[in-house]
Image (cartoon, rainbow, N blue to C red):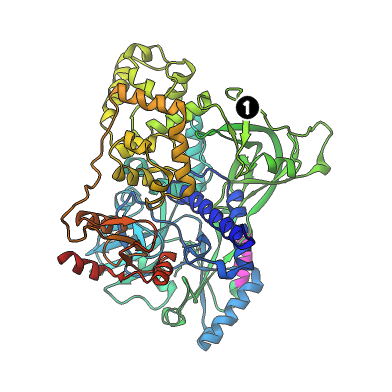
C-alpha cells in the first residue's frame, strides 16, 4: 500500500466511525463511546484533513452542520433555514465580531444590542395558523426537521391556541422558534424519582430534554417536565416588530412563554460587561445556559447584515467555559453494556456543578485511567460543560494521603468472570462471553424495549430477576415462560403475571424490522433494521447476506456489514434464531417486489442530497414501485444520479464518471414514459 492509499483508508475508516457514533448519539440517543473519545476521533480527522485538504470529501463529518434527521418521524421542510450561531469566547473575540460586522454595515457603530441567555436545550419550531398550533418540529439539519407536534402538545406552557387574551388577533400564519429544556430543579426531582424506583439516573438536563421530545410515544414526553421559551419569529403573514426587544414583547403578548431574563446594551462594551457579570450569576439560573446570545436589536439591520454559512452575522453566542470542580473519587464501577463493552464509571462524592448535583462521571476508558494515573480515593477535577456528560479531567496527586493505590483494570468481566479483550480498532474492552449474565440482562432489556419488541410490563428490574433466577438464558426463553414462573417473583400476582405472558406472546406479531432491531447486532439500530427488512423477507434470507451485498444498502458501511456477518456466524446466535423459529417468532416482510414491466425496469439509481418534495424514502419507494433499483454508491453501471440540494460526494463521483443526472421533476417525467 502506498502512503497515500494508507491515508485515504485511514480517513475513510475515521469518517465511518464518526458517522456511526454521531448517529448513535444524535439520532438514537444511545452513545457507545464518551464525548471525549468522539472528540478525539473528530480531532484526528480534522488534523489529517488540515494537512491534506485535497482529501476532504463533501460528505466528511467535518463538513456537516447540525444533526442528522431521525427516520422515525415525518420530515418537515422549514419555511426558512433555521440558522445556527457563531461562537465568541471572551471579550477579544466579541470585539473582533463587532468590528467585522461594522465593516459590513456602518450602522452597527450606533446600534444597540439585545442579550438573552443561550439556553442549552433543543430547538423547536412552532407553526400557528389562525391562532391554532398546527405543527411543532425539531431543527433537524436546519432545512428539514421532524414533526414532533404530538410531543410538543404535551408541554403545558405551550398554548394550543393563541392569543390567550381576546384583545389581540393572531396573524393568519406565524412560525416561531424557541428552545425546549428541563429546569435544574425538575431534573433533580426526576432523578430522585428514578432513584426511588431503582432506575438509572439521567445524566444531564439537555440530553434528557432531547430524548424526551423525540419519544415515539407522546405519553412518555408528557411525563417529563419540559419547558419552552420562544425567542424568534421565523416567518409571519403579518408585519414583524422592528426590534428584537419588541419581538420578545410581541411573542409574550400572545401568551407564549418568553424568557423574562434579557438585557439591552447600548454599546458593545456594555454588552461584554453584561456577559461577564451574568457569567458569575448564571449558576443561579434554574436552567443550563452555556453562554449569552448578543443580538443586533434593530431587525432591518439584522436582516441586512445577512448570513455567513449557517450563521447570521447579526448575532453572536458569547460562550462560557464549562465549569470544573474538585471532589473525591470514591470508587470505580465497571459496567458491562449489551454489546459486551466494559467501561469504567467514576463514583464521586456528590458535588454541585453549576447547579446540578453530580455523583457519577465518565472516565472514558481504561487507557485514560492509566495515562492520567487516576487512583481510587484521589481528589479529582470534574468538568461539566452543559451539553456533555460530566467527565474526569485529571487527578490531583499532590493531595494524596498515601492510601491511594494504582488502579488495575479488571482482566475478567465483573459479571461473569470471563476474560475481557481489547477491540484492536478502538480503545474499548469487551467481555468475550456472549452468555454473560450482565450482557444478557442488557440484551433482553433492549429486546423487550419500546423501539424493539415493545413488550409492555417487562422493565429492567423484572428482566434482572428473570436472569438471576436463571429462568431465561436467551431472549428466546421469554416465549416459553409460564404464569407460574413469574408468580414467585417479587411484586408479581397472578393477574400481572398473566398480563406479561400475554404481552410476550402478542409480540410474536411484531414486524421483521422490530425483531432485527431487537437482535443487538452492533451498528444495527431502528433505521438500519427498517432498511434491512425491506431488502430481506425473513431472518433466513438476512442471515445469508454477504458483506458486499449488505454494503449495497444505504447507510450500511463496511464495519456494520462485517459485524452483521460475524453476528450470524456465532453458534449461540444461530441457536437463538432456531429457537425463535420453534417458538413461532418468525416474522416475514414483504420486500418490494421487483417489477419486470415498470417504466424504470432495468435502471439503477443513486440518490444524493435533499429533494424539494420527496423524502429519501418516498423517492426510493417511487423508483422501486416502477421497477427501478436504488443503490448506495455510484459506479459505471449506475443509470442515473437523482440529485437534491446539498449533495454529497456521490455527485462528484457521478460527474467524474459521466453518469446522467436527474432532478426530482425529471424523475417524475421519466415515470410517465
Ligand atoms: S438565536 C438567527 N437565541 O443556540 C437566530 N439561539 O448555537 C439564531 N439558543 O441553535 C439563534 N438560546 O438553538 C438564539 N436566546 C437564544 C438561544 C439560542 C439557545 C440555541 C439555538 C441555536 C444554538 C446556537
Rendered location of residue 87, percent (x, y): 56, 67
Front-lying residue, 228 or 414: 414
Q: Quadrant of the C terminus?
A: bottom left
Residue 183 visible in this rendered orientation of the protein = no
Q: Is mark 1 within 8 Å of ligand 1?
A: no
Left/right of residue 241 with respect to residue 349 in the rendered view: left
Q: Bin the neighbour count of mark 1 within 10 Å (Cα to Cα): few under 14, some 14-19, many 20 and up.
A: some
Q: Which residue is mark 1?
A: 419
Name the residue: 44% across, 44% down.
561
Q: Main secondary structure of the magenta part?
A: helix
Please tell me whether residue 512 is drawn above or below residue 660 in the rendered image.
Answer: above
Asked which secondary structure carries label 1, the reply is loop
Please tell me whether residue 250 is drawn above or below residue 405 in the rendered image.
Answer: below
Q: Quadrant of the N terminus?
A: bottom right
Please tell me whether residue 382 is drawn above or below residue 180 in the rendered image.
Answer: above
Rendered location of residue 531, percent (x, y): 33, 47
Which residues make up the magenta segment?
A: 272-280
Front-lying residue, 392 or 304: 392
Is residue 263 a member of the stretch shown in magenta?
no
Left/right of residue 380 with respect to residue 179 in the rendered view: right
Name the residue: 59% across, 65% down.
49
Name the residue: 45% across, 30% down.
443
Amino acid at each position: 500500500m502506498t502512503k497515500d492509499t494508507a491515508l485515504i483508508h485511514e480517513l475513510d475508516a475515521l469518517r465511518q466511525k464518526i458517522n456511526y457514533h454521531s448517529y448513535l448519539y444524535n439520532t438514537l440517543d444511545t452513545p457507545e463511546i464518551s464525548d471525549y473519545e468522539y472528540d478525539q476521533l473528530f480531532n484526528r480527522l480534522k488534523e489529517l484533513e488540515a494537512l491534506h485538504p485535497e482529501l476532504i470529501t463533501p460528505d466528511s463529518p467535518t463538513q456537516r452542520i447540525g444533526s442528522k434527521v431521525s427516520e422515525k418521524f415525518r420530515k418537515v421542510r422549514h419555511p426558512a433555514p433555521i440558522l445556527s450561531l457563531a461562537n465568541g469566547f471572551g471579550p477579544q473575540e466579541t470585539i473582533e465580531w463587532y468590528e467585522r460586522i461594522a465593516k459590513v454595515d456602518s450602522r452597527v457603530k450606533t446600534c444597540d444590542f439585545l442579550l438573552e441567555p443561550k439556553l442549552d436545550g433543543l430547538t423547536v419550531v412552532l407553526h400557528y395558523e389562525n391562532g391554532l398550533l398546527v405543527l411543532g418540529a425539531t431543527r433537524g439539519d436546519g432545512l428539514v426537521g421532524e414533526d414532533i407536534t404530538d410531543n410538543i402538545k404535551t408541554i403545558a406552557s405551550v398554548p394550543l391556541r393563541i392569543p390567550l387574551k381576546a384583545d389581540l388577533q393572531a396573524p393568519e400564519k406565524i412560525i416561531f422558534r424557541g428552545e425546549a429544556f428541563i429546569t435544574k430543579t425538575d431534573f433533580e426531582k426526576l432523578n430522585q424519582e428514578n432513584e426511588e424506583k431503582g432506575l438509572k439516573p439521567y445524566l444531564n438536563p439537555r440530553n434528557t430534554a432531547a430524548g424526551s421530545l423525540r419519544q415515539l410515544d407522546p405519553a412518555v414526553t408528557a411525563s417529563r417536565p419540559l419547558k419552552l421559551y420562544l425567542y424568534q419569529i421565523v416567518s409571519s403573514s403579518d408585519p414583524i416588530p422592528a426590534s428584537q426587544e419588541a419581538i420578545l414583547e410581541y411573542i409574550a403578548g400572545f401568551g407564549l412563554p418568553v424568557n423574562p431574563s434579557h438585557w439591552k446594551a447600548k454599546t458593545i462594551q456594555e454588552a461584554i460587561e453584561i456577559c461577564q457579570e451574568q457569567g458569575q450569576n448564571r449558576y443561579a439560573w434554574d436552567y443550563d445556559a452555556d453562554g449569552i446570545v448578543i443580538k443586533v436589536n434593530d431587525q432591518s439591520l439584522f436582516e441586512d447584515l445577512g448570513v455567513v454559512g449557517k450563521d447570521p452575522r447579526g448575532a453572536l453566542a458569547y460562550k462560557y467555559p464549562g465549569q470544573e470542580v474538585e471532589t473525591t473519587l470514591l470508587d470505580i464501577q465497571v459496567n458491562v453494556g449489551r454489546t459486551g463493552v466494559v467501561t469504567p464509571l467514576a463514583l464521586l462524592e456528590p458535588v454541585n456543578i453549576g447547579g446540578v448535583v453530580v455523583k457519577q462521571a465518565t472516565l472514558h476508558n481504561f487507557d485514560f485511567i492509566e495515562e492520567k494515573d487516576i487512583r481510587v480515593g484521589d481528589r479529582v477535577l470534574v468538568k461539566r460543560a452543559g451539553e456533555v456528560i460530566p467527565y474526569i479531567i485529571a487527578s490531583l496527586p499532590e493531595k494524596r494521603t498515601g492510601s491511594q493505590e494504582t488502579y488495575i483494570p479488571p482482566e475478567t468481566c465483573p459479571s461473569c468472570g470471563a476474560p475481557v479483550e481489547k477491540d484492536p480498532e478502538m480503545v474499548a474492552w469487551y467481555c468475550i462471553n456472549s452468555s454473560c449474565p450482565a450482557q444478557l440482562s442488557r440484551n433482553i432489556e433492549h429486546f423487550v424495549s419500546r423501539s424493539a419488541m415493545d413488550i409492555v410490563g417487562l422493565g429492567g428490574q423484572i428482566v434482572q430477576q428473570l436472569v438471576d433466577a436463571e429462568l431465561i438464558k436467551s431472549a428466546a426463553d421469554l416465549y416459553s415462560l409460564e404464569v407460574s414462573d413469574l408468580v414467585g417473583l417479587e411484586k408479581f400476582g397472578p393477574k400481572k403475571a398473566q398480563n406479561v405472558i400475554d404481552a410476550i406472546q402478542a409480540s410474536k406479531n411484531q414486524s421483521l424490522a422490530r425483531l432485527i432491531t431487537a437482535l443487538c447486532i452492533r451498528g444495527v439500530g431502528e433505521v438500519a433494521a427498517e432498511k434491512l427488512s425491506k431488502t430481506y423477507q425473513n431472518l433466513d434470507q438476512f442471515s445469508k447476506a454477504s458483506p458486499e451485498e449488505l454494503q449495497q444498502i444505504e447507510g450500511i458501511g463496511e464495519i456494520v456489514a462485517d459485524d452483521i456477518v460475524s453476528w450470524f456466524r456465532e453458534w449461540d446466535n444461530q441457536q437463538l434464531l432456531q429457537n425463535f423459529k420453534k417458538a413461532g417468532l418468525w416474522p416475514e416482510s414483504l420486500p418490494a417486489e421487483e417489477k419486470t414491466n415498470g417504466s424504470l425496469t432495468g435502471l439503477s439509481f443513486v440518490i444524493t442530497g435533499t429533494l424539494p418534495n420527496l423524502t429519501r424514502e418516498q423517492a426510493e419507494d417511487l423508483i422501486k414501485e416502477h421497477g427501478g433499483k436504488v443503490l448506495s454508491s455510484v459506479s459505471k453501471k449506475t443509470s442515473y444520479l437523482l440529485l437534491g440540494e446539498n449533495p454529497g460526494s456521490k455527485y462528484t463521483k457521478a460527474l467524474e464518471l459521466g453518469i446522467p443526472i436527474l432532478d426530482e421533476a425529471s424523475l417524475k417525467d421519466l415515470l410517465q414514459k
